[in-house]
Image (spheres, helix red, strand yellow):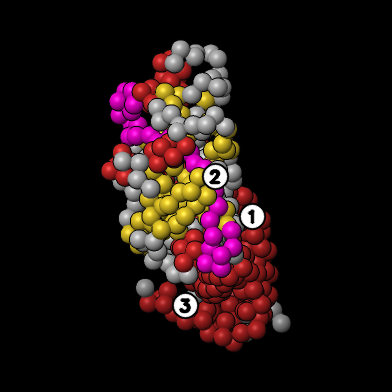
Amino acid sequence: MGRFLEYWKMAYFNIRMNKVRAFLTMLGIIIGIASVVGILSIGTGFSNWVSGSLNGIVGSNFTVYSNGSERIPKYVLDALVKKYPEITGYSESMGANGTTLDLKKKEVEVILSGGRPIIQESNTAELLYGRLYDEHDYEESSGVCVIDTYAAKKLFGFEDATGKIVSVDAYGRELNLKVIGVRKSSKSEDNSNNYNDKNVSSDGEESAIVVGVFEDSKLNFDVPATYIYSVFGLDADQYYQATVFVDEPAHVAEASRKGRRYIEAVMDKRGEDAISVMEFTSLVSSLTKILGGITAFVMLVAAISLFVGGVGVMNIMLVSVTERTREIGIRKSLGARTSSILWQFLIESGLISLTGGIIGIIIGYAFSSLACLIAHLVKNSITLKPDFNVLLILGVAVFSMGIGIFFGLYPAAKAARMTPIDALRHK
């Protein structure tokens, strides 16, 4: 142990004596390690953010909808929930367009998104004030709504708008909705797409029914679906579209296949392509794998600089062996073993690479943190966090030291094979 400690001291002394050369030797290692750590941290962090965002939007559910004029009966969905234990519930997904006046008395568009209480679970935005509508509100067709902080500020000038009444003009009808809850505004909601279906109102006119919609300039109100049924005289037992909830995301794909087959069987629509399902969990999984593959490829390209850095270590160590030939001869003539010379140069090359690796880790961490911060400043909705853990630090440090030892092996072996006489004769 004492002998190896002496080798470390000698390696440290030789590096200090040639600081500039040692730093230039480390530069390739530093750039390579910093690139690998930075890309891996940002890539994994981005993949986690994308997966988390999509899972938050998608959730453990799938959508089932009718392709034709015939709607899906409520009793079919009730039977579906009873038949499969992994299916925990369902909700119709519907809504209506309307307008209201904001704080400045300007007309703004409103989306009334109706459903059962369970559908509120798919909205991951934090509830800041009040409560969500419940089964009692649903059964009583209560004129209540849950809005977000953006809508609250737009309409009232402050966030806690619970208890306030909003008057909405929807297809010529005046709807007075009481705000019972306020969610934190979610950018992912603001950027979602519109999907339009049609339902028929009590006077026989077609009214646009908007399903799960959000736009930048529109305000979204979550309301009990029964309230929309009662206001527009719609059939509460027939659905064009419904969201079916599953106990775990892993069960969504299989549950969606079972659900479609069962609904078609009960409605006697087998083979007619009358029912379609839409689930995104498989897409999320595939996208995550693609992002992981892209990160690995880019990291592989960045790792090429590690090879270049390793060649640099070998080159400098060969120069060092040439410069210290007489020193090697003197040590051998005084009884130094071949293994001692070998270990001396191996430890020196390993120390150079390890130091470069540590510096590269620090730079890579700083770079990835700065890149994530800039991304957040440019786009507030992007909240990336570099995935930087202890195992990564240890792995990169060991890897960088291994590069030094690998590429330093030839120069060290060359030094160790020298005979004392040849080494002393060298000028």
**Which residue is tagged 3?**
8
Q: Position of residue 193 (x, y in %)?
A: 59, 46
Give the amino acid at mark 1: Val
Q: Which residue, given by chain and number where applicable, does mark 1 sit on? A: 298
Query: Can the viewer see residue 189 in this picture?
Result: no
Q: Nearer the viewer, mark 3 or mark 2?
A: 2
Give the quarter of the figure containing the C terminus: bottom right
Q: Give the residue at x 33% y 59%.
A: 130
How far across and how far down the image is residue 406, in percent? 57, 61
Which residue is under mark 2? 172
Where residue 407 sits in the image (x, y, percent)?
A: 61, 63
Q: Earlier in the sequence, mark 1 or mark 3?
A: 3
Label 2: few (<14), some or many (≥20) within 10 Å? few
Q: Amino acid at mark 2?
A: Gly
Which mark is first along the chain, 2 or 3?
A: 3
* Point 47% across, 77% down: residue: 7
Q: Nearer the viewer, residue 326 or 403?
A: 403
Q: Residues within 10 Å of mark 3 (few under 14, many from 20)?
A: some
Q: Is residue 6 left or right of residue 42?
A: left
Q: Mark 1 and mark 2: span between their CA atoms?
A: 57 Å
Which contiguous range is marked in magenta?
A: 78-107
Residue 121 vs residue 303, the one in the foreground: 121
Please tell me whether mark 1 or mark 2 is closer to you in this view. Answer: 2
Q: Nearer the viewer, residue 296 or 130?
A: 130
